Amino acid sequence: MLPGIIFRNSLCISITLLSVSQPSLFKRVFKCPSGCTCSKDSIICVASSVIPRTIPNEINSLSIVNGSFPEIKEGMFALMPSLQLLLLNSNSLSAIKDDAFSGLPHLEYLFIEGNKIETINKYALRGLRDVTHLSLANNNLKSLPKDLLLGLDSLIELDLRGNVFECDCQAKWLIDWLKQSNATVTDVYCAGPGDRKGIRLKDVPDQQKECLSTDFVLHQTLATQSMSADIFSYKEDIYVAMAVPNSDSCVVMEWDHIEIKFRPFDTITGRSIVGCRSVLIDDQAYVIVTQLFDGSHIHKFEPQQNKFTKFQVVEASNISKPNDLEVFQIGDEWFFLVVDSSKAGLSTLYKWNDTGFYPYQFLHEWFRDTDAEFVEIDGKAHLILASRSQVPVIYQWNKSSQKFASLTDIPNMDDIVTVKSFHVSGDLYLAMACYIGDSKVLYWTGKQFIEVQAFPSRGAMVLQPFKFKDQHFLVLGSDYSFSLVYRWDEKDKQFIKFREVYVQWPRSFTTLSTDQRDFLLATSFKGKTKVFEHIPVDNSL
């Protein structure tokens, strides 16, 4: 028995020593994938449809050429940490996903050339801190996501040739990077747009100004329908007076500088109110209210009661259907004009006489007037009256008679609903909304108004010009579609379509600038009144 025991123990010891001294005998042997050629330190695969899952630690180079896999997914090479070179040329790649090369801490050379890549995710190259040579040459790239190259601190050479880069705002970061980088970058040329075609990316002029834009975003919704909105300041506070016909009221709201929104302040009740306009006379605030019935009323702000109280009932025997209310000053005299849209009425001018407003002059009999605009032309006061039944008429203030006298009309402008004046670089323009035909912008030549731009419009009720800082805008409000915001192009001297804002049945657009922020208040005849904020947008981000 003893010799047998000694033999078995000796055998066990021998096997143990063998397994310790020769571990390679029990290590799994790596099998070179089909379609690949393997050597001691590299693998080359041609026309392969799969990627090796793992490789031996001795392998530091992997090349896959003419493969048929469509994209590089997250962590596709994560089980190959020894790789120092990865070549993926002439495959069918169209996209590279985030963290596509995670798990490759030693990778130095990455070549992805001659594919069909159109999109690269922002974090596709994340973690490649040791990469010194990167090539994305001869793909279909029009742009690269911002900060794609962030973290590639060891990068020495970059090749982006053979792509179709659009040198617009999306490429701004790359253009800036090329101008500042110490890496060697083979010349890359713009495929567009326009006059930039053929220019080297790093030679594209600074785009800072052209890539800064703006937008209009919904800031506040007021749960009320409204026909008009008049924003005014009184004793360092900001208010808006809105005509709300469906509740027979003129709603006055106050701007909350802390909450940055309008809040209820006062409600002026009446009978079928269609217009509310403020006027500040001798440091006193008034609100003029026009109604379809019971004439017009003037309400005065009473500090003791902190509300508006009735101050005057205005004689309105010649007004049948008030449609617009225009308040203005000539010299030291205050006036307001009620525009009458009925053939049976008269657009009537009222004048202030220290005790109230009284009828002063009747204008434009038998013409369904829709809107009026007070404007100074060549230093003289004028009124422009728009009408549904004839072309707009211009009245000029006569200093001798102290009345408005008919001067001329604006031909070929039929069915005008509203007329608004504005200035661009000192030049005078008119914006005219047309309900059926094209709405138009007119330019004052010094002798007459001439058409310079037309806007297709159906159901348009307002074409409102406004300005925020150094940018001029024009908003076309329609009953049948989204309201269109146009922005002035200084080079072409015309308005270019810019944004859409959704307002149901818009009736007016009014601006408010406060606390370094800009807002646009849009009234709605059948929907909710909305406040949009005008915000800066960097299109290069």
Image (cartoon, rainbow, N blue to C red):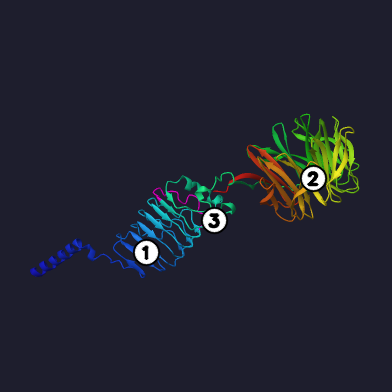
- In the rendered structure, which disc, 3 or 1, sits on the residue that comes first in sequence? 1
Q: Which corner quadrant of the image does residue 266 belong to?
A: top right
Image position, residue 524 (x, y; %)? 74, 49
Identify the residue under disc 2: 449
Viewer-proximal residue among 225 and 55: 55
| Residue at 31% from the left image edge and 60% from the top image edge | 59
Query: Where residue 280 is drawn, which disc sits there?
Result: none
Q: Tell me the SS state at disc 3.
A: loop
Q: Where's residue 106, x and y in %?
A: 35, 54
**On the rendered image, what quadrant is the N terminus found in?**
bottom left
* Amino acid beneath label 1: Arg
Of the residues shown, which amino acid type is indicated by label 3?
A: Ala
Residue located at (41% from left, 54% from top): 134
- Looking at the image, residue 285 sits to the left or right of residue 317; the answer is left
189, 482: nearer the viewer: 189
Report the amino acid beneath label 2: Phe
Q: Main secondary structure of the magenta part?
A: loop
Q: Is residue 178 magenta?
A: no
Question: Residue 153: within the magenta?
Answer: yes
Of the residues under marks 3 and 2, which one precedes in the sequence? 3
Magenta stretch bounds: 141-156
| Circle 3/circle 1 CB separation < 8 Å | no
For disc 3, the marked residue is: 191
Q: CA distance from mark 3 to mark 2?
A: 43 Å
Task: Examine the rendering and report whether any part of residue 484 can be seen.
Answer: yes
Horizontal and vertical percent for residue 249?
Answer: 79, 43
Left or right of residue 434, residue 41 in this image: left
Which residue does the numbered mark 1 point to in the structure image? 53
